[in-house]
Image (spheres, rainbow, N blue to C red):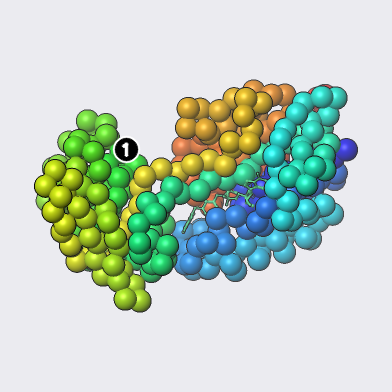
Amino acid sequence: PYDVLVVGGGPAGASAAIYAARKGIRTGIVAERFGGQVLDTLGIENFISMTYTEGPKLAASLEAHVSEYPIDVMKAQRVRHLDKKDYIEVELESGAVLKSKTVILSTGARWRNTGVPGEAEFKNKGVAYCPHCDGPLFAGKHVAVIGGGNSGIEAAIDLAGVVKHVTVLEFMPELKADEVLQKRLYSLPNVTVLKNVQTKEITGDNKVNGLTYLMRDSGEEQHIELEGVFVQIGLVPNTEWLEDTVERTRFGEIVVDRHGATNVPGVFAAGDCTNSAYKQIIISMGSGATAALGAFDYLIRN
Ligand code: FAD
């Protein structure tokens, strides 16, 4: 069996595997796509100490760093089940079962898509998901935020300080965000809120140039010219496969303590799949290190 088996090969998993291997213990990492969400990212400007890098480049460095250590890397393998017996057992889609004394779950998350025409086509060409990451790229421009929940309104308030104008589009007749956020939003001079509207299409040529929406009460279609669209309709953790084996929040996030430990002894978690407050590369890497050190502490005590 492994001492530490990491499930997921994004920034959190890579960091956890390196920290574990540096303790001289038997470490494995199993991942469907090594690199994770970073593979889908174009420019990265907030990975501290690197003024600029690109997703595929950072993903390659993660893999190169992991390969410096005697870590069993199992790529293109999807995990489907976790079980705690004498060891913790991790079952792959292939049917194979891996055994380990501790497991670190770092399966990340995915942004929920609207699915409207133009969204996939203009991803990274005006369609964005992370205001902390891409907000500054739209300085002085007009952008839309799709989604009037807490994350949408937080994004709109954040962006309003950076861009020229923000239009918020909410499908329902009322915003779902907390009252205090709505108050703050309505106090801003450069924000327009459209409620009871359905986004129909994100338009563009080689990058985004507008958005078409339907007014749901009148059925009338409208078009606005803008340069960016932030989709804020939810971040879904990749944890469905855990079912009831590990405690999760109602959003599906794995609940961890400050050592990265879950409610199951020997099972740790890190990164975007957990209830960490913010979801960023640097934060995932930090929590991966925490979970590996937490797992090591557990091993020397058990
Ligand atoms: P992920 O990167 O999601 O990695 C999850 C890993 O788990 C992957 O290897 C995946 O294949 C694997 N996995 C999932 N399910 C299974 C399974 N069942 N079996 C086996 N393996 C599985 N953050 C920044 O800090 N700066 C940015 O500029 C930035 N830009 C972004 C742009 C985009 C378009 C996106 C989508 C995200 C961006 N982020 C950015 C967020 C950042 O990418 C994430 O916070 C970070 O990648 C999370 O790392 P993670 O290791 O927790 O999860």
In the image, what residue type sits under mark 1? Asn
Most foreground residue, 51 or 178 = 178
Q: Residue furthest right?
A: 1
* Residue found 37% across the figure and 51% down from its top: 114
* Residue found 60% across the figure and 64% down from its top: 58
Q: Position of residue 282 (x, y in %)?
A: 54, 51
* Residue found 66% across the figure and 39% down from its top: 105
Q: In which quarter of the image is the N terminus?
A: top right
What residue is pinned by disc 1? 150
Q: In which quarter of the image is the C terminus?
A: top right
Is residue 135 visible to us here? no
Name the side, left or right, on which 66 lies relative to 176.
Answer: right
Vertical position of residue 125 compared to residue 245: above or below: below
Name the side, left or right, on which 77 lies relative to 279.
Answer: right
Q: Where is residue 262 in the image (x, y as percent from the top left)?
A: 64, 27
The image quarter containing residue 45 is bottom left
Q: Residue furthest front?
A: 219
